[in-house]
Amino acid sequence: MGQGIWLRPCAGFPGHGQMKPEQLEIERLRKEVAKLKAERDILKKAAAYFAKDVI
């Protein structure tokens, strides 16, 4: 009976530490969003720089 108390909590971790496919996709998309935001910020700065020369 004593061992059952310790074994039950371990059963709540499916995949033994591996991420589910949905979690992997979310992580990939978050990285892509961060990259796209960085690219957007660079393009905004470049557009502002070139707009100064025109005006």
Image (cartoon, rainbow, N blue to C red):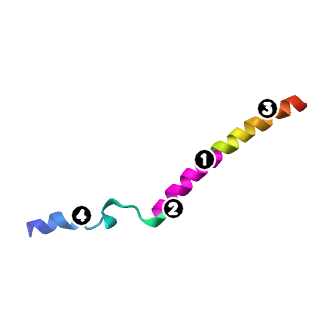
The label nearer to you, 3 versus 4, is: 3
Task: Label 3, secondary structure: give it.
Answer: helix
| Residue type highlighted by circle 1 | Lys
| Residue type highlighted by circle 3 | Tyr
What mark, if any, has residue 25 been given in the picture? Answer: 2
| Residue at 23%, 64% in the rendered image | 9
Task: Give the mark nearer the N terminus: 3 vs 1.
Answer: 1
| Residue at 58%, 52% in the rendered image | 32
**What secondary structure do most residues of the magenta stretch adopt?**
helix
Task: Give the mark nearer the N terminus: 3 vs 2.
Answer: 2
Marks 3/2: CA distance? Answer: 36 Å
Q: Name the foreground residue: 1 vs 21.
A: 21
Task: Give the mark nearer the N terminus: 3 vs 4.
Answer: 4
What mark, if any, has residue 10 been given in the picture? Answer: 4
Marks 1/2: CA distance? Answer: 15 Å
Task: Label 4, secondary structure: give it.
Answer: helix
Percent from the top left, x then y, of residue 48?
A: 79, 35
The label nearer to you, 4 versus 2, is: 2
| Residue at 79%, 32% in the rendered image | 49
Q: Is residue 51 left or right of residue 24?
A: right
What mark, if any, has residue 49 been given in the picture? Answer: 3
| Residue type highlighted by circle 2 | Glu
Residue 6, image quadrant: bottom left
Where 19 sits versus 43, above or below? below
Task: Label 2, secondary structure: give it.
Answer: helix
Task: Give the mark nearer the N terminus: 1 vs 4.
Answer: 4
Where 30 sits versus 15, above or below? above
**Stretch of the chain drawn in magenta:** 23-37
Residue labelled with disc 1 = 35
Q: Is residue 39 left or right of residue 3?
A: right
**Pointer 3 with pointer 4, Cβ within 8 A:** no
